[in-house]
Amino acid sequence: MEKQVHEKVRAFIEKHKLISPGDELVLGVSGGADSMMLLHYFYLHQSLYNVKLKVAHIHHGLRQAADLDAQLVEESCQKYKIPFYRHDCNISEISKAKKLSEEETGRLERYNFFISLLNPNGKIVTAHNMNDQAETMLMRFARGTDVKGLAGILPRREQIIRPILCLTREEIEAYCMALQIPYRDDESNFKEIYTRNKIRLKCLPYIKEELNPSIISVLGRQSELYREEEDFLELHTKELYEKACEVSENQILIKLKAMENMHRYMQKRVILKAIEEMVGRRDITTNHITSCVELMELQVGREIHLPYGLVVKKDYEELRLTKESRRNKEENTSFCLDLKEGIYHIPKAELTIEVRKCVYERINQNNENIYTKYIDYGKIKNGLQIRTRRASDYIKLKGGSKKLKKLFTDDKISKAIRDTLPLIADGDEIVWIVGNRLNIDYYITEQTDEILEIKILKERN
């Protein structure tokens, strides 16, 4: 059993090129069977892959038993001699403040915490398995999705990898039992309060019993097929998009003449890609895309208003995608404030920030996360500011200097928020994109004498 699982995971990692020698892996470990199996696997194979390991555990503040989950993960890390990082938060309060579901808030908090632990060559490792894949596909199908949605959970998405996506939950639990790996069940997984739980507890058992006992593996294979189809379609969409669209800083023009001979399905994909470039894909529905296609046949001057202030307008020879009242928004949201030691409240950024000096021996880097960063005070050249972006801004990463505009494009930061992101800057050099990247030149080292702690006391909405 052990050998079979190891070979299966290793083959999956090699097939999808998930890991490279020298990677630092941030393992998301909740204490459940999936993540404890993941932890054990990489503990055994750390030298094989030539990687460094960190474990990230988030305490959501929703369940009394969560203290025991955290204790199990921490004790396992001590046993395996792997660094353990814990982040406590109150998901219930945060979800109310952000007006999001607890499920969505929990997901955002987890990935924000994982990202905060990443080094430039780091990867986030999650314990999604084949059952999660089947549940995701059925949930998306029931809600309505396209081929991309039916591809389900990807083995790799940017810096996030899922190396045990090839295993069923039954294989994982059998592995844990055979090797006596302790784990804890989350009792909320057995309550029919979330859509995913209903699919897991009612829908899939019914399909297994009445229609297809191999539904989990069937959907797993289908997800790979849909991924291949989506890869092909995405390449074709990109070619058509480049022919049909003119892109500038403030707008995208979709040329109607170039769209005329396209299949209606590809027209929709090109329009969706243009929308994604402007505001991302979130909250964009099939009805929105269909309305944009129909707009091409309507009279000049007609327009559609989409989420996040996006306006699609019919001109003589194109569809014009622009942001509503963009100039006013830029004027109202830009800010710049000098930073020295102390506490600052920045209303336009919806942030309260604390800056203080400390010495190497007194800092606890376990506290460094998405809300707190430590930088080398001696590396500061011009004095720090917190501000919004400027055209000349750049940041130094492991691969070298990069213009901030190029980084935002590469990291797929929505254009709708780029002008409002708070930045810690040293002249034109960005030290920290708050909640995101940290400039490699400001890392603390053994030669650092004085350290500056920058802490977010109140998170922006």
Image (cartoon, rainbow, N blue to C red):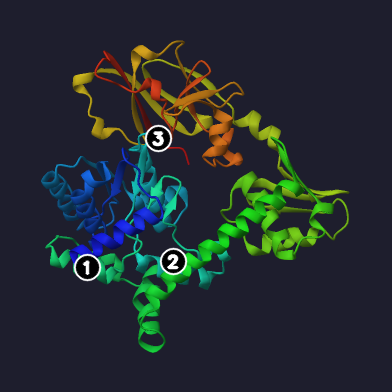
User: On screen, 378 above or below 14?
Assistant: above
Q: Amino acid at mark 2?
A: Thr
Count every numbered label the image shows and give the total: 3
Quadrant in the picture for residue 406:
top right
Query: Of the numbered discs in the image, which one, if any, rests on residue 136?
Result: 2
Q: Nearer the viewer, residue 221 or 302?
A: 221
Q: Amino acid at mark 1?
A: Glu
**Is residue 162 visible in the rendered structure shown here?**
no
Q: What separation in Å lies between label 2 and label 3 (alpha carbons)? A: 34 Å
User: Residue 362, how many percent across, how many down?
Assistant: 20, 22
> Circles 2 and 1: CB distance less than 8 Å?
no
Query: Of the numbered discs in the image, which one, if any, rests on residue 173?
Result: 1
Counting residues from the N terminus, which is met first, the one under dot 1 or under dot 3? 1
Left/right placement of residue 363 relative to residue 353 reads left
Left/right placement of residue 356 relative to residue 241 reads left
Query: Which residue: 51% across, 73% down?
Result: 142
Counting residues from the N terminus, which is met first, the one under dot 2 or under dot 3? 2
